[in-house]
Structure formats: structure tokens, C-alpha cells
Image (cartoon, grey):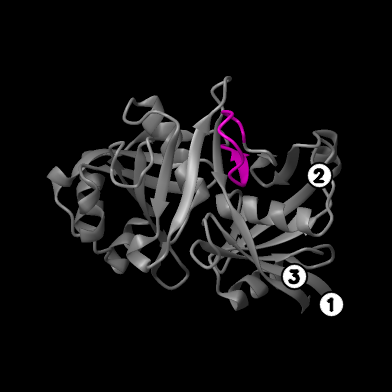
Amino acid sequence: MQPRRFTQLDVFADHALQGNALAVVLDGEGISDAAMLDFARWTNLSETTFLLPPTAEGAAGGADYRLRIFTPAGELAFAGHPTLGSCQAWLNAGGTPRQAQVVMQECAKGLVRIQRSTAADNAGPEGLAFAAPPLQRSEVPAGVQAQVLAALALQADDLVAAQWLNNGSRWMGLLLRHADVLPRAQPHAAALRALGVKAGLCAIHAPGNGSGDAEPVLEVRGITLTAHGIAEDPATGSLNASLAQWLSAAGHLALPYRVQQGAAMGRAGRMRLVADAQGQIWVQGRVHSVVTGQVVL
């Protein structure tokens, strides 16, 4: 065991302490898988990450660093707020990318591009942005939809559409008819765990919804599975990446748009979804450093 650089950050929020907390161990070399998982359980955050040098294959592909992402229950192939938060932690610690405005992250999902200047659509910088990874999606059988709606205390006519979404993290995306439906959802932990479903609820606000923004706003709730039950996520990059890919491809919502998440738990998660000229979707958000120091691992 030895002292290692450590930081905690707040991701996807206009102001610190309103988004999604992340723990990052900057010197991840030499820590066993078991010790990584033990530390992730100890931090008790949704995700804890460990920065390492890229593998030979990753370096050949242009990776600047390698990231391992752990929940208290195990390792993830990809997750959004750990991607942006860990990138900012790496930059804050003096990391220098091979390309001036692009950081290339290696993770279990593969290589993920992160834009340092997020003017992917010339809208101006709004923090970092990661390229949404490839998405696998499929229809949700009607019977499963009914079971999940019941587990959320919602009715059939509350739902517009549903899809299985998997970009390294598997969600059931649920597009609801009105934004006022989201606060009515009351997740039943045992039922959702029995179904093995992480539920990504969303509803569209029309432009001119009082936010002062001309772009549409998507209201989102992310109901996650934990080692002991379920929890709600205040700002979920992987879910919002897959929602953007699904909703835009299906014609439900055009890019760019903004996301509000976390209201049900007293947070103000914020991000922006844009597409560049090649059709690549980017998830933009701000990252705030909150805690810096050392951890003995």
C-alpha cells in the first residue's frame, strides 16, 4: 500500500455540488482488481475510477491513458460521468494529450474521444464533451413494458415508446408522454431488481418552456440497480448518450437539445447533446473539482 493522488469531482452541473460525484485515483498502477473494488465499495459513490497508462494496443490507437470504472458492485465497460470527470482529473494533474483539443481514453468498451473544446457545433465551450459510443438497441416486449411500468407505479397511457439501450451500460429507455409524469414515478426496488432493469425515464419539454433556452429540453430520471437495491442517479452520461441516439434516430427529438436530470433528488444535473457534421453525437457537460489529496492503497 502507498499514497496515491486522489480527487473527487462534480460532473454534469453548472455549479459544484449539483451534479454527479466521482472519485478518481490518479495513480492506478499496481492496485489489484480486488483492491479497486474494495475502494469503490468504501467510497460508496455510484462510480470510482482508476487512471493507468494505456495498453500497447490502446497506445497504438492513440490512447492518452486507460480508465477502469468501478461501481460498488463491480466493473463497468463504459460510463459517461466517469469519462468526463476522469479526463478533467487527468488534465488537472498535468496530463498532456497527443492532440491539442482531443483526449483519447481507453476503457473496456474501447477508445472514447473527448473534446477539450466542445464547440462541436460552433456553439461555444460548455465544458468537456465525449463522443457517444456505438449503441445496440432493440424493442422491449409489451409484457416486459407492462411489468416495468407497474414497478414504477405508472400507467400504460403514460408511455410513448420503450427501447433496450446498451452502449456498455444497459438501460431500458422509456419515453413518457409529459414531463409531469416523471415526478409521479415511484420505483419499487424489489420488482425492478427481479426484472434486472435500470430504467431511464425521459420526457420532452417544448422550446420556450420557461428555461429561457430556444432549444428543446429533455427531462430525465435514471433509476439504477445497486448491490443492495436501487438508487437514483443525478446525471447519467451513458444513459443520455444512448437516449440521444435512440430519440434522434426514431424522430422523437432533434439535436441539439439540453438535459435536466436530478430534480427528484434535489440536484440540478445539466448537459447538452449535439451532433457534428458527420452525425457523431457528443455529450457536453461541465466538471468541477471539489476534493484533492491522497489515498493510501
Q: Position of residue 247 (x, y in %)?
A: 37, 33
Please check the rendered image and state whether residue 134 is part of the magenta-colored stretch, yes or no. Answer: no
Q: Secondary structure at mark 1?
A: strand
Q: Which region of the structure is painted magenta?
A: 119-132
Write down the residue under mark 3: 6
In this picture, residue 12 sits left or right of residue 157: right
Q: Residue at x 32, y 56 (%)?
A: 195
Q: Position of residue 220 (x, y in %)?
A: 36, 50
Q: How many marks?
A: 3
Write down the residue under mark 2: 64
Residue type indicated by callout 1: Pro
Q: Earlier in the sequence, mark 3 or mark 2?
A: 3
Let me know if residue 113 appears in the view: no
User: Which quadrant does the C terminus fall into?
Assistant: bottom right
Classed neighbour count for the residue bearing mark 1: other residues with Cα under 10 Å, few (<14), some (14–19), many (≥20)? few
Write down the residue under mark 1: 3
Answer yes or no: do the residues labelled 1 and 2 have beta carbons within 8 Å? no
Q: Separation of disc 3 and disc 2 at Cα? A: 19 Å
